[in-house]
């Protein structure tokens, strides 16, 4: 049954996507199962890799990282190995790395403290990955991190 979920599992995943801190008791009430049945289903969804983990969403402004940018990477040498994620995984300001179709090879989502911090980050990315970059600075974020609709 790869790629699809039973209706009860969809309901559980939907509830957890809305609030990952929801208790098993609350979850059981919302989906109409016993607490033990919900617990068992959640564990199975975790084991199958449907639920990848639970995280806290942080406000960049509040933690001192108010500047968000998207950085597109283009290889300096198209014949070079495509190992950019491995070359960049040590850079903590990179929040996400997407392999994309189009002119660029990857797009990075980054968060930094300032324009100067972004300039330094771009230098480190270029040096580490031997790429050229094109940067888009985010002015505001009407929404982000939404879970897929089931």
Image: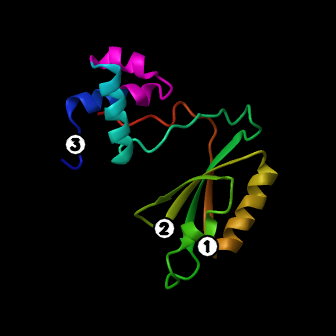
- The structure residue drawn at horizontal position 29% and vertical position 33%, both measured from the top left corner, is 150
Instruction: Find disc 1 in the rendering and name its residue.
Output: 131
Image spot of residue 54 (x, y percent): 51, 37
33 lies above or below 103: above
Q: How is the image coloured?
A: rainbow
136 lies above or below 80: above
Instruction: Find disc 3 in the rendering and name its residue.
Output: 4
Q: Which stretch is magenta?
A: 15-32
**Prevailing SS of the magenta stretch:** helix
- Earlier along the polypeptide chain: callout 3 or callout 2? 3
44 lies above or below 88: above
Q: Quadrant of residue 72?
A: bottom right
Q: Are marks 2 and 1 in contact (CB under 8 Å)?
A: yes
Q: In front: mark 3 or mark 2?
A: 3
Residue 21 part of the magenta segment = yes
- The structure residue drawn at horizontal position 68% and vertical position 66%, both measured from the top left corner, is 125
Residue 118 numbered tag: none
Instruction: Find disc 2 in the rendering and name its residue.
Output: 105
Residue 79 part of the magenta segment = no
Res. 109 in view: yes
């Amino acid at each position: 049954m790869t790629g699809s979920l039973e209706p009860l599992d969809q309901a559980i995943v939907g509830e957890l996507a809305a609030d990952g801190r929801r208790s098993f008791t609350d979850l059981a009430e919302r989906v109409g199962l016993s607490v033990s049945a919900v617990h068992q289903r959640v564990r199975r969804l975790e084991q199958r890799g449907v639920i990848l983990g639970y995280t806290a969403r942080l406000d960049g402004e509040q933690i001192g990282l108010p500047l968000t940018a998207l950085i597109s990477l283009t290889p300096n040498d198209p014949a070079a190995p495509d190992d950019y994620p491995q070359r960049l995984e040590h850079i903590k300001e990179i929040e996400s790395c997407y392999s994309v179709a189009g002119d660029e090879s990857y797009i990075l989502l980054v968060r930094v403290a300032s324009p100067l911090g972004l300039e330094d980050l771009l230098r480190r990315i270029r040096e580490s990955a031997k790429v050229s970059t094109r940067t888009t600075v985010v002015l505001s974020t009407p929404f982000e991190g939404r879970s897929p609709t089931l």
